[in-house]
Amino acid sequence: MVSRRGFIFGSIGVGSAVIVGGGIGKATQNGLFSAGEGDGFAAWDESLEGMSGIAAAGVLAASSHNTQPWSFRVSDDGIDVLGDRKRLMGAADPRLRELHISLGCAIENMAVAAAAQGLATDVEIVRGGSGHFARLTFKPGLIDKEYAALAEQIPLRSTNRGAYDADRAPGSRELSALSACAAGVSLKLLSSAEERSAFSALTVAATEVHVADAEMQRDSHAWYRMTQAEVERYQDGITIDGAAAGIVGTTFLKMFPPTPDAFDEQWAKVTGETHCATAPMFGLLVASTAGDHAAWIAAGRAYQRIQLEATRLGIATHPLSQSLAVRDRDLARGERNTFAEALDSYAEGGEVVLAFRLGYPKADVPRSPRRALADSSI
Ligand SMILES: Cc1cc2nc3c(=O)[nH]c(=O)nc-3n(C[C@H](O)[C@H](O)[C@H](O)COP(=O)(O)O)c2cc1C
C-alpha cells in the first residue's frame, strides 16, 4: 500500500515531471537542440564566389542588433550599397551612427571576399542622405595575400557575448595585427586595471540608463527574437542563442522566453558580472572628427576587419555600445551628458564611434540568423 507521504511526493514528482517535460518540449520547439540550423542560417553556407558571392559575404557582416540594414544592388560591374529604412533602430540609434558602421562592416566583408578572387575594391562614398551610401567597383589588382586570406574567416566570425578569460590578454603581436586593421580611424586599447574599471563603470551606468528609457527599450526590443518561430520568420535580430547564457541559462530562456523587462534586468546584470568583469581589455574606435558619416563607415570597415583578424587569432570580440547609445540619445537633442564627457576624454578632440571588448572566450557561440541574399537585394 502506498503511504500518504509516498502518495504526496509521488504526485509532486509526477507534477514536476509534467512541468519539466512541458518546459523541455517548449525549449525544443525554441531550438534547444537545433541552434544555428534551418533556413535562417543557410546564408552562412553560401558560396562566396563571383559577384553574387561578394554580395553574399556582405550579408554575413556584423550589424547592430543584427538589423542587417542594407539593400544591395548587384550588377556586372559593381555593387551599390543602400540602406533599408525599415531596418533602422529609431531611439536606439538616433544619429544613425550604428547604421553607418553596420554598412561599413558589410562593405569590408565584400572587399575581403573580392580580394580572395584577386579583385581590388574601389569604394566611393555617396553623401547626401539619399539612402544610397556607397558604390563598390572591382578590378583585378595586386592583392595583399594576408588580406585576401581573411575571407576564410568570414563564415567563422561571430559576436561572442559569453565569458572571456579575464587573466589572458592578447599579446603585443596580436594587438599590433589588430591595430593594423583600423584604417581610417584609430584603435585605442584600455588594458590597465584602472582603465578597465573606469570603462566598465561607464558601461554599467549606461546600461541602467538604457533599460530605464522606454523608447530605447521599445526600439531595441523590436529586434529581439525570443522564439524559434520569430527567428525563422524574420531571419534577423538578437536571439536567445546569441546571449551565450550557457546550457542551463539557454535551456531556461528557451523554456520561458523572457519579457523585455526580464530580459533587460538580466542584460544589466551580465553586462557588469560577465561582459565587463571577464574582459581582459576593451577597444575603442576613435574618429578624428565628430559626426562624420564617412568616418563611421570607415569605423565599420575597421571593426569588421578587426573581427576577421581576431577570429583568425582565436580572439573573440563583442561591441558594448551602451555608453555611446546614451550619449547619442542626448546629442541628438542638442545636449551633452556625462557619457559624452567621459567618452570625449578618450577621443582627443575626435569621437569614440564604437566600443568593444576582446579576449579569449571560454566557449564558442552558434551563428546568428541571416536573411537570404535575395531578401537583402533590390
Ligand atoms: C555598430 C554595432 C554595434 C553593436 N553593438 C552591440 C552591443 O552593444 N551589444 C551587443 O551585444 N552586440 C552589439 N553588436 C553586435 C551585433 O549585435 C551582431 O553583430 C549581430 O547580432 C550579428 O551577430 P554576429 O556578429 O554574431 O553575426 C553591434 C554590432 C555593430 C555593427
Image (cartoon, rainbow, N blue to C red):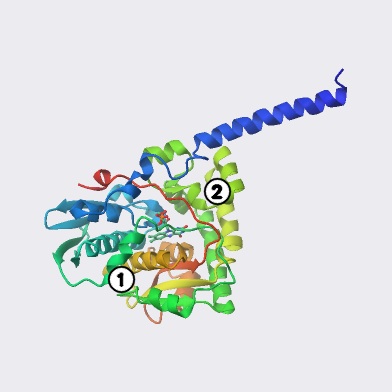
Between 306 and 63, the one nearer to me in the picture: 306
Q: Residue at x 52, y 72 (%)?
A: 281
- Residue 146 numbered tag: 1
Quadrant of picture, ligand 1 = bottom left
Dot 2: few (<14), some (14–19), or many (≥20) neighbours within 10 Å? some
- CB of mark 1 near ligand 1 (< 8 Å): no
Q: Residue at x 45, y 54 (%)?
A: 216
Q: CA distance from mark 1 to mark 2?
A: 41 Å
Query: In the image as oriented, which residue stretches furthest toward the top?
Result: 1
Dot 1: few (<14), some (14–19), or many (≥20) neighbours within 10 Å? few
Amino acid under label 1? Glu
Q: Name the residue tied to disc 2.
A: 263
Residue 270, placed above or below residue 341: above
Between 69 and 9, the one nearer to me in the picture: 9
Is residue 96 in sight in this rendering? no
Q: Residue at x 17, y 52 (%)?
A: 74
Q: Residue at x 29, y 44 (%)?
A: 372
Left or right for 268, reference 185: right
Image location (x, y in percent) of residue 269: 60, 57
Image location (x, y in percent) of residue 162: 54, 58
Is residue 35 in sight in this rendering? yes
- Local SS, label 2: helix
- Local SS, label 1: helix
Left or right for 183, reference 201: left
Image location (x, y in percent) of residue 35: 47, 44
Q: Quadrant of residue 305?
A: bottom left
Q: Quadrant of residue 151?
A: bottom left
Amino acid under label 2? Phe
- Residue 225 numbered tag: none
Single out the mark in the foreground, 1 or 2. 1
